[in-house]
Image (cartoon, rainbow, N blue to C red):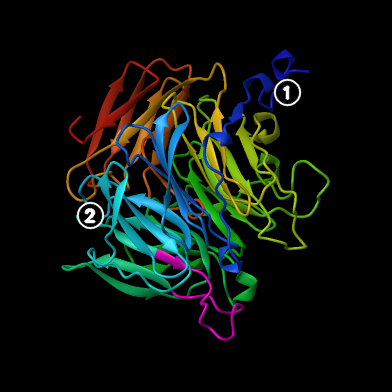
Amino acid sequence: MKAASLPLCLAALPCLADMPTFEDVSHKIPQHHYAGGWEYFVGGGVAAFDCSDNGLPDLFLAGGAGPSLLLRNKGEMEFSPEDVPLTGVTGAYPLDIDGDGVLDLFVLRVGPNIVLRGLGDCAFEDATEALGIEAGQGWSTAFSAWWDQGADRPTLFVGNYVDRDDPEGPFFACDDNQLMRPAAQGYLSAPMTPGFCPLSALAARDARGRMTLRLSNDRHYYVRGGYEQMWDIADARYLGPEDGWQEQMLWGMGIASRDITGNGLADVYLTSMADQLLQLAQGDGTYRTAPFEMGHTAHRPFTGDDGRPSTGWHAQWGDMTNNGRADLFVAKGNVDQMPDLAMYDPNNLLLQGADGRFTEAAHHAGVADPARSRGAALVDLTGDGRLDLVVVNRRAPARLYRNVTKDTGNWLAVDLRMEGGNRFAIGARVTVETEQGGQWQEISVGGGHAGGQAGPLHFGLGQAGDAVIVVDWPDGRQSRREIDRMNQRVLLTPDG
């Protein structure tokens, strides 16, 4: 029976007729694998950013031991592929490091990391040494960046996995992480310890409303005393129980942050090996674990007969049908051949209902791929206001899906620019207010699993016919813009 012919819906569940539909258009890109030995069991990220300056996001896919892949977006899901002669790549994050208004790429590698300076028209040059950035020799698996107040250049965080030179490794052998602060000439680099093998990092406002670097760490049970970490950026210290931060132990893989309860505070979804955790931000500055009844857990495969626990990697919030509620995509897949964990582990697409509960829709939507997925990106690749999906798989071809959902709600894509070194307004908070209420997102660099995005923030707005966009800029200014036409990309500056 076709979904559209089902006339009735349970109150707690989205109607099948309202569920998203994706078309698998993977044939439009070359077969690309994230491959390699045990050093590439983790990683495999996607960077989505407009390097061709045509208003559409291009894609950079990590290749592991093989070459990476750059996909220039020509529109209508047509791409011009270019192999990038970089091997050892685990992931990449776009940001404008040198403040010239052109996006660069911080490329994470097994071995020396590389900063690719954007030259325009998807051309790049290795600017690691020229920018004074320490490349390192580690196994880098996490990245985040932020601009301190008044700074022209960002502070950079690199999370490193196992120290490959430790003779007692890989157990009890997590490497030091790396913090790089801008100096008069280049950057000053210092180790951040203790390191518990982070696979994701995110600098953003926490439940207290303060800028905090959250580290989601793997291999806790192989590291004495390992746990998730929160580092207060202004105070330059790790939070502890005295701050209301309760130590949490996960096999942490990815981070997704967004306010899904409407209380003005960002909630956090953490992927893991054997469980997935949703932490709801509370008004007292703490977090509580979301109840199981919310339907977000995705602990085991939702289809098939493999009942072993799931392994989650990239997670990302996004409104799939533009109904005004953030949904959640989770990339799944066994590390490689771990016998205690599911081998048939399809990706999840969790739709948020009007009551805040989530319903699994990956199979119906056509994105329930059981390959060993790693990094991913929910991003509007065509400019039609519908979030599309790209997924990188380990030892299997990357997948590309076009969102072809009919009768979606209205939407806005909000892009920011400002003067100074922080051209793309990292740290800004964007609120869109309509008669249905308000929703907000923060512009950040980091999170996900081994890959991030730079581009407009996507807001689904349901049936709203007008809106007010309020921007709290990183320098403390606030601006308001009234919007009387939906379904468009809006470029804002602090002056209008």
Q: Main secondary structure of the magenta part?
A: loop
Q: Is residue 39 above or below residue 21?
A: below
What is the number of callouts on the image? 2
Q: Position of residue 97 (x, y in %)?
A: 27, 55
Image quarter (top left, top right, bottom left or bottom right) of the N terminus: top right
The disc, 2 or 1, on the residue closer to the chain's N-terminal end is 1
Q: Residue at x 32, y 38 (%)?
A: 52
Say whether marks 2 and 1 touch (CB < 8 Å): no
Q: Residue at x 32, y 34 (%)?
A: 415
Q: Is residue 87 above or below residue 13?
A: below
Name the secondary structure under disc 2.
loop
Q: Is residue 140 above or below residue 343?
A: below
Q: Residue furthest right?
A: 305
Region in magenta: 158-176
162 in magenta: yes
Three-letter amino acid code at the position of disc 2: Asp
130 in magenta: no
Q: Which mark is residue 10?
A: 1
Q: Which mark is residue 98?
A: 2
